[in-house]
Structure formats: structure tokens, C-alpha cells
Image (cartoon, rainbow, N blue to C red):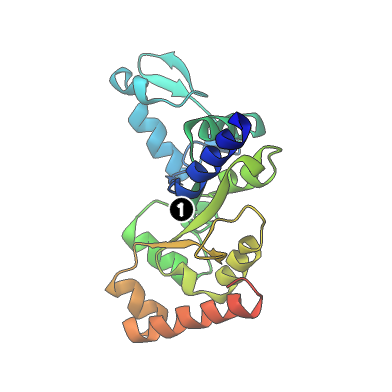
């Protein structure tokens, strides 16, 4: 009887437990032995000694004015997943920055537009965290979703990549299995570039939703 009651209580707690997610801002990596552009700024900001208490667990303090870290390691991601599970998190939302070439070069109009919002935010390997998560032996412990940035989600090529990720068994869903996505920094400027305004952008996202439905993801 005690075991049955314990199971029932556990089941009830599971049913009423709110789903808790955390947005990841992956800016802690090296690219070709140099800090990736976004990581360069986080490293510069956290190098003064008064900010060392905010450094992640995988960082090393080299001096009162300098630190070193690289999150783009499988061992680091594995430990982060274990920490997240222990903390009671259900999912991570990974940022989806555009990938840029040297000197912030890109062939995507949408990615060029994002540089107007955040100049110099032109990472060479912005999805390193997501890649390490997907290859982790522990990724079944925490689900994931995507935080779509700016107008880039309006690009069909980007949408195809999102759709491929949305079928992953660990992708976070809501409302009976519908994939969860976030949209960030989408203002009048992005709406005009996406679909000539908010009405046109609505049509773009409706088409994206239909693409997901056709693949059985909604």
C-alpha cells in the first residue's frame, strides 16, 4: 500500500509539475584557437577580477585581469546536462545566430540585416552548443528547442534546418505534441524584410507552420 501511494504521489507531482526551460546564450567558445566574435566580448567583460565570480565552472583564472575558457568540448556539455538535470530543468532553448565567414561576410540578406541590430555579432560557429548537446550520451536527460532570431527564420533554407531538428525525439513539445519555438528580436524592420510587413510575415510563418504539419510535426 505504501508503494502504491508513493507511486501515486509521484505520478501526481509529475502531472502538475510546470515545464521549466532556460535560454542558452552560447558565447564561450574558441574558433581556430581564437575566441569566436561573440565569445570575444563575453571573455573581455568577465576578465576583470571583480567579475570572476560569474565565470562558468569550466573557466580558468590566469591572472587578476585575464581568464581562459572553451565550452566547445563534449566533456563540458555532458557536465552541463547533468547539472541541468539536477537543477530540475526540463529543456534548453538554443539561440540560432547566423553563421558568418571572415570579416562578418554572409550571402544571406537576413543575416546581413541582423548585423544592423547587433553589429559585430557575427560568430563563425554559433551552434557549437547545440551540436555538442545532440552528440552527448546524456541528451535524453533534458529536452531542447530553438530561439529564432531576427528575420532569418523567414528564409526557407533556415526553415528546413529547423524542421529537421523538430523531429528529434528530444525536441520540446506542448499541447499534445506540438513543437515549441521562440521568436526573438522581430520588430517592424524584420517584418518588412520578411514579408513586406506584419501581414506578409504572418503568411510566411503560416506557410512554415504548414510545412511542419505536412511532415507530421504539428
Q: Answer few, some or many: residues within 10 Å of disc 1's Cα (few below 14, many 20 plus, some between 14 and 19).
A: many
Quarter of the image containing the N terminus? top right
* Residue at disc 1, secondary structure: loop
The residue that appears at 61% across and 38% down in the rendered structure is 32
Residue that label 1 marks: 122
The percent coordinates of residue 40 (x first, y second) are 43, 37
In the figure, residue 132 lies in which quadrant?
top right
The residue that appears at 66% across and 34% down in the rendered structure is 74
In the figure, residue 73 lies in which quadrant?
top right
Quarter of the image containing the C terminus? bottom right
How many numbered markers are drawn? 1
Asked whether residue 90 is in view, the answer is no
The one nearer the camera, 149 or 115, is 149
The single residue placed furthest to the front in the displayed view is 1
The residue that appears at 63% across and 47% down in the rendered structure is 131
Quick check: 74 above or below 159? above
The percent coordinates of residue 37 (x first, y second) are 45, 44
Asked whether residue 185 is in view, the answer is yes
The percent coordinates of residue 98 (x first, y second) are 50, 59
Q: Is residue 183 left or right of residue 160?
A: left
Quick check: 204 above or below 148? below
The one nearer the camera, 51 or 148, is 148
The residue that appears at 47% across and 68% down in the rendered structure is 152
The percent coordinates of residue 56 (x first, y second) are 45, 27
Amino acid at each position: 500500500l505504501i508503494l502504491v501511494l508513493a507511486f501515486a504521489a509521484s505520478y501526481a507531482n509529475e502531472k502538475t509539475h510546470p515545464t521549466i526551460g532556460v535560454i542558452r546564450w552560447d558565447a564561450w567558445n574558441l574558433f581556430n584557437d581564437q575566441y569566436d566574435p561573440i565569445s570575444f566580448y563575453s571573455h573581455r567583460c568577465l576578465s576583470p577580477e571583480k567579475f570572476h565570480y560569474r565565470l562558468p565552472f569550466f573557466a580558468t583564472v590566469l591572472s587578476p585581469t585575464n581568464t581562459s575558457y572553451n565550452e566547445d568540448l563534449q566533456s563540458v556539455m555532458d557536465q552541463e546536462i547533468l547539472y541541468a538535470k539536477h537543477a530540475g530543468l526540463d529543456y534548453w532553448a538554443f539561440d540560432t545566430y547566423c553563421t558568418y565567414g571572415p570579416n562578418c561576410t554572409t550571402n544571406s540578406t537576413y543575416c546581413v540585416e541582423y548585423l544592423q541590430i547587433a553589429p559585430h555579432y557575427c560568430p563563425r560557429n554559433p551552434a557549437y552548443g547545440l551540436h555538442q548537446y545532440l552528440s552527448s550520451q546524456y541528451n535524453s536527460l533534458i529536452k531542447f528547442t530553438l530561439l529564432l532570431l531576427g528575420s532569418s527564420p523567414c528564409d526557407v533554407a533556415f526553415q528546413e534546418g529547423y524542421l529537421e531538428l523538430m523531429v528529434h525525439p528530444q525536441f520540446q513539445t506542448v499541447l499534445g505534441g506540438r513543437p515549441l519555438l521562440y521568436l526573438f528580436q522581430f520588430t517592424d524592420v524584420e517584418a518588412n524584410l520578411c514579408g513586406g510587413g506584419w501581414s506578409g510575415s504572418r503568411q510566411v510563418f503560416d506557410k512554415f507552420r504548414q510545412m511542419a504539419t505536412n511532415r507530421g510535426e504539428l
